[in-house]
Amino acid sequence: MHNNLLFLSSSVIILSLLLAACGGAANGPSAADLAATQQSLESTQQALNAQAAQPSNTPEPPVAEAATQEPAQDAATEAPVSQDEAYYTEEFSSPPQNWTYDLYQGDEQDFDLYTEGDKLVFDIQGANVWSYYLYDSYTYTDARVDFRAENLGNNNNNVSLICRYNSRGWYEFNVANNGLYWIYRYDYDTNEFTLLYNGGVANLKTGKDTNDYTMICEGDRLTLGVNGTEIRTVEDSRFDEGQLGISVSSFDDTPVLVEVDYVTISVP
C-alpha cells in the first residue's frame, strides 16, 4: 500500500511539470487532456490516502485457550473399602454388627449377651443354656481362632470354640472350667454330637481366672490349644467349610458369668 502511494504522488508531480513545460505546444498533449489526467490522478491519490488512514480489518489470530484437564482419579478412592475383614481382632469396644448369637438350648430369659468395659459378657442365669456367638461376614475352609476369657461366676461351665458351622453341622471344642475338654462333631441330619476326643487340660487356670484358648481347623486336622500349649489334634473330614464362632454354656450350677477380652481370626 505505501509503495502505491509513493508511485501516485510522483506521477502527479511529473504531470504538473509537463503541463508547465508544454504550455500548449502543438506536438504535445492538449492542455485539457493533461488537466483531466491530473484530476484523475489526484482523485486516486485522495482515495488511497483515505484508505491508508482506515484501521486494518485483518482479524487478529485467536488466542488458544489452555485445555482443561480433569484430575486423574486416585486408585485408592475408586471403591469403598469394606469394614468387614476375613482376618482381624475383635476387641468389643462396642457391640459388633457382624456377629450374631444362636441359642441352641435353654430359655431366652435366662441368657444375656452384651458388651461392657471393652468386654463381651456372657451372663447366664439358667441351667443348661448353650449359646453360640458366630462371625457372619465370612465362611472359612482353614482358619485359626484365639480368644481370651475370664471366668467370674460359677466354677462349672463350658467355654467353647466353633469352626465350619454350616447347614449340615459344625465342629466344637469344649473346655470346662474344671479342667476337662471334649472335641465334638455335630450333625443336623441325626441331631447328634459325635465325640471325637476328650481328656484333661493340665495347664488350665481353674476357678475365677483368665485363660487363652486356641482352635485351628486346617484340612482334616482339628487342633485345640490352651494357654499357648497344644492339647490335642484329631482328624475328621465331614465338614470342609463354614463360619467361625465362640460359645459359653452352663451346666446345672448357675450363675455363669464369662467376659471375653478379644477374639482374633487368623491364617493357621
Image: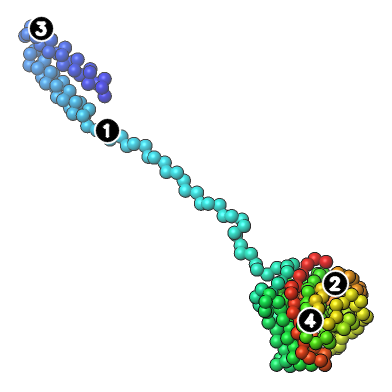
Looking at the picture, how far across and down is residue 4, in whole percent?
24, 21
- The span from disc 4 to disc 2 (Cα, nearest Å) is 15 Å
| Three-letter code, disc 2 | Asn
| Three-letter code, disc 3 | Ala
Q: Earlier in the sequence, mark 3 or mark 1?
A: 3
Q: Nearer the viewer, residue 238 or 110?
A: 110
Q: Nearer the viewer, residue 113 or 25?
A: 113
| Three-letter code, disc 1 | Ser
Q: Earlier in the sequence, mark 4 or mark 2?
A: 4
Q: Which residue is mark 3?
A: 21
Q: Which mark's residue is nearer the viewer, 3 or 1?
A: 1
Local secondary structure at mark 2:
loop
Question: Would you say 141 lies left or right of 80 here?
Answer: right
- The span from disc 3 to disc 2 (Cα, nearest Å) is 135 Å
The quarter of the picture where residue 88 lies is bottom right
Q: Do the residues bearing badges 2 and 1 touch, measured as CB atoms within 8 Å?
A: no
Q: Which residue is mark 2?
A: 227
> Is residue 151 depicted above or below 32 in this figure?
below
Q: Do the residues bearing badges 4 and 3 touch, measured as CB atoms within 8 Å?
A: no
Q: Residue 103: in sight, yes or no?
A: no
Q: Which mark's residue is nearer the viewer, 3 or 2?
A: 2
Q: Which residue is mark 4?
A: 151
Question: Would you say 38 lies left or right of 52 here?
Answer: left
Which residue sits at x=19%, y=15%?
10
